[in-house]
Image: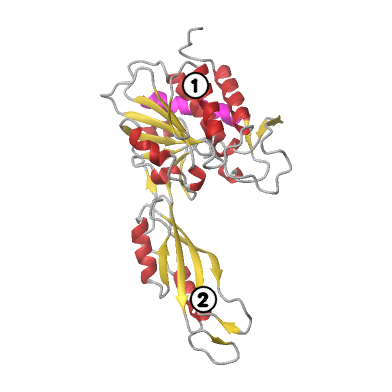
Amino acid sequence: MEELKSVYSKEELLSQAVDLLKKLIATPSFSKDEYNTSVEIENFFKKNQIPTKRFKNNIWAVSKNFDVLKPSILLNTHHDTVKPNKAYTLDPFLPVEQDGKLYGLGSNDAGASLVSMAQVFVHFYEKEDLKYNLVIALTAEEEISGFDGIEALFPKLPNIELAIVGEPTQMNLAIAEKGLLVIDGEMKGTPSHAAHPNDDNAIVKCMEDIQNVLNFRFPKVSDYLGEVKVTLSGIHAGVQHNVVPEACTFTLDVRVTDEYSNKEAFEIIQGQMKSTLTARSFRLNSSKIEMDHPFVKAGLEIGRTTYGSPTSSDQAIIPCTSVKIGPGDSRRSHTADEYIYIKEIKEGIEIYIRILEKVL
């Protein structure tokens, strides 16, 4: 077998990345059905003579000179995708390279991050005398915040001091991320015939209650993420025009900042409302990394910027310090005819390496 080169050229890294991304695009990998893409990932590492481990549809590996006495830095992103929407004009599973772009489902979110991180891991795999071990985990079920992705895998990983989460950020550093809290609410009233007076109309009471919480402002404002955002995303009541229903139900989408835990935010919202509220989950909390962290400082030194991200990712369930950074633009995620620029993958590989060279 040909001996593995310790360092690939930039051109070789980019070529391998694009080839792998084309294979992933051509392989459907909806959440909970990612086995086939996990095999493609295993095959990539096998080709590069890197042993991998599997847990469910999660594939992970450690650097060749792994030292149990050293802390580890984790490269993590996901290989599941959402289902293509009906507005696609291209075949979502046919990788098409045109005008400097690579089209296909999952190309931007988060295939470009995955293939860039895979090349970065290959680049550092045989390096010696590093301050940190490097670990890579390419995981499942991110798009549904499932239980069998990074959350299930994390206890099996070595001691992780920092997780670098690959999502489309234009290779800038998302140093904070809002948490997600979904709340179902119900306002009870008195059912009646619509022709008669009713001072206990569940719909009217619910409208007043919802307007009250939408006008409310959480007192603490995050330096990174601004205000907690409460959005009414669903409401339902009544089935007949002449019947006042006994209840009105609704859903609130709450994007929580690092100033509050999800439980704290829920309690504050309940205190502002007369409706009965139920949280679907408290799992997806906000996260942040301090500006003086070595990884953030290294990114700033090479000209990257920092921001607070309004979108959620696996950061919400990673139980250690984390930062989100990856090639692509989050505004392209989940859109029809999704694409990534080839130059963005090239830039992603180079920037990951430049930052890690300062940290490792």
Query: For the point 35% across and 65% down, which residue is it?
Result: 267
In the image, residue 322 lies at what x, y percent? Answer: 38, 39
Residue ranking furthest to the right = 89
- The chief SS type of the magenta part is helix
Query: For the point 56% across and 32% down, which residue is it?
Result: 36
Q: Is residue 343 above or below residue 217?
A: above
Give the amino acid type for the residue marked by disc 2 in the picture: Met
In the image, residue 80 lies at what x, y percent? Answer: 54, 39
- Give, as a single range, the part of the protein colored magenta: 343-360
Query: For the point 34% across and 59% down, which residue is it?
Result: 263
Q: Which residue is mark 1?
A: 45
In terms of image quadrants, where is residue 157? top left
Relative side of 243 to 58, left or right:
right
Q: Nearer the viewer, residue 30 or 326?
A: 30
Q: Which mark is residue 207?
A: 2
Q: Is residue 349 magenta?
A: yes
Q: Which mark is residue 194?
A: none
Give the amino acid type for the residue marked by disc 1 in the picture: Phe
Q: Is residue 234 above or below residue 173?
A: below
In the image, residue 128 lies at what x, y percent? Answer: 35, 15
Q: Residues within 10 Å of mark 1 (few under 14, many from 20)?
A: some
Determine the CA span between mark 2 and mark 1: 56 Å
Between discs 2 and 1, the one toward the N terminus: 1
Q: Is residue 271 magenta?
A: no
* Image quadrant occupied by the C terminus: top left
